[in-house]
């Protein structure tokens, strides 16, 4: 079996555990930096008139395509997933689209009745004057990368103005806690978790997550439809709140904190023939109806 | 009926015309600049007003706001009428994604290649037949389109485009006499078309950079092509650009925020009014629940 792992060259070292695990399970392993991938729409590319290539290799020939996406190249990763629609992979292009936009991801999780903090999203600091009910500070500003805490409207506007015009910026209230819990879910199982204490020195310890948190984590994974994901939880009072869902966590962090090789779980999942694109039940019905409606309408 | 245009802060003539016609046709119609739109907990607001309470929106979302615009339209989807699929905002602003969607639909598009690596582009340049077209992924109005006659000039353009930190986009050049066709598709019909002719010594035909337009009656074949392209991209209102190449017509671009100043002048038709009338008729007949919309879309596609 052949696998191609498509990553961001800037995190090639972080992705090394995945490549190493893949070598143990697959007959052929290729690591392809996303910026060297060539996307062709060409009459010469049979049969569909399009192909995705790395060097002289057509990526559709691989048994499994494992993207480890980053925001910096998100549009290229989306293109890859779209063009390799028929390939086995842990998530589809439409599922990845949720991760390209924080607001959409939150909408999806909320629609599955998962606890998310309230938020607002703007693309310009001008719109802040129109926020219903005003804003209570401090707030967390979450542009596509790296969050920033702000304590006043003036600072908030300044921070937003630093970003490229039109960039969607999500703003929410910080949760007062000095501890977060990271959970790694593969399929219907939480395979690893750790607590991270933000004291003078960051300490990460393995965590035995209770049934409730496990249930929430698996539900979140199903809500986004991918085969696996890492989720960061914050405890707000007695409620678990999802802070982040990631497809590209730091694998070494999980291993160092928990002793669990999450990369091995991802690769086992791939080798066992499990494919992503777990669709919402409604989408499956929609497809069924669309396939059969010509018959029904006759 | 109440609705709004969601568009750029700086309104073009097209947005102003749409606003003018919309105010005549609807009881409540206003302009919501993207800079003043706020999403709060899955709801979209403009100056405190929940936009999902409207009957329709007409999106005129500029490229810089495409991700925010997509989010807004996804939140409003199923709650009111909009003449484009939310994903059209993303697909149509990205030139590669546009051609990909059209190729997937089996429509003729130029051979096109994209990569973010200079090394990969250099390899590609050896394979290309010259001249080639090099583009920015997100250019508009003809900007960011370059024609390279040799590999050496292509390398010079590549050096220039690299500073924009966008993937590099190479397209086969379709031989034509400095002309292309802009077909305006509205509601599954071509309501007008014009031939756009490039200025002397220029290969780009965009009106905005000096091209001229004259009305054109399209053949049935070209009309069908434009209509299929609009459907493939999920747009009820769009401009489809076609070149008549030596081997037949080729679609080169689609425009989600189609500018219709040139077409309005060329045809002498009030395009803005036609758009507004179309939206009005659709709002009267559309159902907005997800299931009903799904069936309506399927039946519409079957009829077309």
Image (tube, coloured by chain):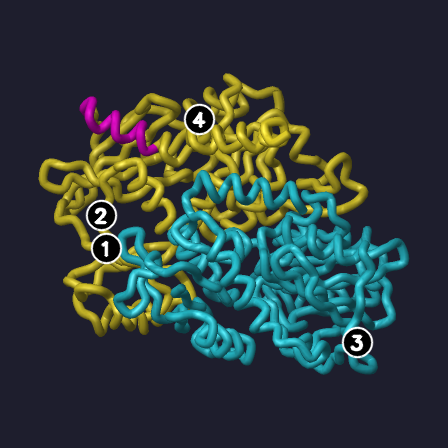
In percent of width and height, residue A94 lies at: 49, 41
Element on which disc 1 rests = strand
Q: In the image, which lettered chain appears yellow?
A: A
Q: Is residue A122 above or below residue A129?
A: above
Please say if the residues under marks 1 and 4 sit with CB atoms less than 8 Å apart. Answer: no
Element on which disc 2 rests = loop
Question: Which chain does the numbered disc 4 sit on?
Answer: A
| Residue under disc 1 on the same chain as residue under disc 4 | yes
- Label 3: how many Cα within 10 Å (few below 14, some 14–19, many 20+): many
Q: Residue at x 17, y 64 (%)?
A: A133
Q: Which quadrant is the C terminus of chain A positioned in?
A: top right
- Label 2: how many Cα within 10 Å (few below 14, some 14–19, many 20+): some
Which mark is first along the chain, 1 or 2? 2
- Label 1: how many Cα within 10 Å (few below 14, some 14–19, many 20+): some
Residue occupied by mark 4: A266
In this view, the mark in front (2 or 4): 2
Q: In the image, which lettered chain appears cyan?
A: B
Number of labels in the image equals 4
In this view, the mark in front (1 or 4): 1
In percent of width and height, residue A65 lies at: 57, 32
Residue occupied by mark 1: A172
Q: Residue at x 39, y 23 (%)?
A: A187
Q: In this rendering, would B213 be left or right of B161?
A: right
Q: CA distance from mark 3 to mark 4?
A: 55 Å
Which mark is first along the chain, 4 or 1? 1
Which span of residues is magenta-colored? A210-220
Residue occupied by mark 2: A117
Q: CA distance from mark 1 to mark 3?
A: 51 Å
């Amino acid at each position: 079996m052949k696998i191609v792992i498509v990553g961001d060259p800037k995190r090639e070292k972080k992705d090394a555990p995945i490549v190493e695990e893949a070598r143990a399970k697959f007959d052929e392993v290729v690591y392809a930096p996303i910026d060297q991938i060539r996307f062709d729409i060409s009459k010469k590319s049979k049969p569909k008139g399009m192909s995705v290539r790395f060097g002289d290799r057509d990526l559709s020939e691989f048994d499994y395509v494992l993207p480890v996406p980053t925001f910096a190249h998100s549009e290229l990763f989306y293109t890859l997933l779209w063009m390799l629609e028929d390939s086995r992979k842990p998530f589809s292009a439409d599922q990845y689209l949720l991760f390209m936009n924080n607001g959409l991801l939150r909408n999806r999780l909320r629609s599955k009745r998962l606890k998310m903090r309230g938020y607002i999203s703007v693309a310009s600091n001008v719109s802040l004057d129109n926020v219903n009910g005003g804003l209570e500070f401090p707030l967390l500003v979450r542009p596509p990368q790296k969050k920033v805490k702000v304590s006043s409207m003036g600072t908030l506007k300044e921070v937003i103005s630093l970003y490229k015009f039109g960039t969607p910026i999500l703003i929410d209230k910080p949760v007062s806690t000095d501890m977060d819990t990271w959970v790694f879910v593969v399929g219907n199982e939480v395979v690893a978790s750790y607590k991270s204490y933000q004291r003078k020195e960051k300490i990460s310890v393995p965590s035995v997550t209770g049934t409730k948190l496990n249930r929430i984590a698996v539900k979140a994974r199903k809500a986004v439809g991918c085969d696996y994901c890492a989720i960061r939880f914050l405890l707000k009072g007695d409620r678990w709140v999802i802070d982040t869902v990631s497809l590209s966590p730091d694998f070494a962090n999980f291993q160092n904190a928990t002793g669990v090789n999450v990369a091995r779980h991802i690769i086992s999942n791939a080798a066992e023939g499990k494919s992503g694109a777990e669709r919402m039940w409604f989408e499956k019905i929609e497809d069924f109806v669309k396939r059969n409606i010509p018959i029904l309408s006759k | 009926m109440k609705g709004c245009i969601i568009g750029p802060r700086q309104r073009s003539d097209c947005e102003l015309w749409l606003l003018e016609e919309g105010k005549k046709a609807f009881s409540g119609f206003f302009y919501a600049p993207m800079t003043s739109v706020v999403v709060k907990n899955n709801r979209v607001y403009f100056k405190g007003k929940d936009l999902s309470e409207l009957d329709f929106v007409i999106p005129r979302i500029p490229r810089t706001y495409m991700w925010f615009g997509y989010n807004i339209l996804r939140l409003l989807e199923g709650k009111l009428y909009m003449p484009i699929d939310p994903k059209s905002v993303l697909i149509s602003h990205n030139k590669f994604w546009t051609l990909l969607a059209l190729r997937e639909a089996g429509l003729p598009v130029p051979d096109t290649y994209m990569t973010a690596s200079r090394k990969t582009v250099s390899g590609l340049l050896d394979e290309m037949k010259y001249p080639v077209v090099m583009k920015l992924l997100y250019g508009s109005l003809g900007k960011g389109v370059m024609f390279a006659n040799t590999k050496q000039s292509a390398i010079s353009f590549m050096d220039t485009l690299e500073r924009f930190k966008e993937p590099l986009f190479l397209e086969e050049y379709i031989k034509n006499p400095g002309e292309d066709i802009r077909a305006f598709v509205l509601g599954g019909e071509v309501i007008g078309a014009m031939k756009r002719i490039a200025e002397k010594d220029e290969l780009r035909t965009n009106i905005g950079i000096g091209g001229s337009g004259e009305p054109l009656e399209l053949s049935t074949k070209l009309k069908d092509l434009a209509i299929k392209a609009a459907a493939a991209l999920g747009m009820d209102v769009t401009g489809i650009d076609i070149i008549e190449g030596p081997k037949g017509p080729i679609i080169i671009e689609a425009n989600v925020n189609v500018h219709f100043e040139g077409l309005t002048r060329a045809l002498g038709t009030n395009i803005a009014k036609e758009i507004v009338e179309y939206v009005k008729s659709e709002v009267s007949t559309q159902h907005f629940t997800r299931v009903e919309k799904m069936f309506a879309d399927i039946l519409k596609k079957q009829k077309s």
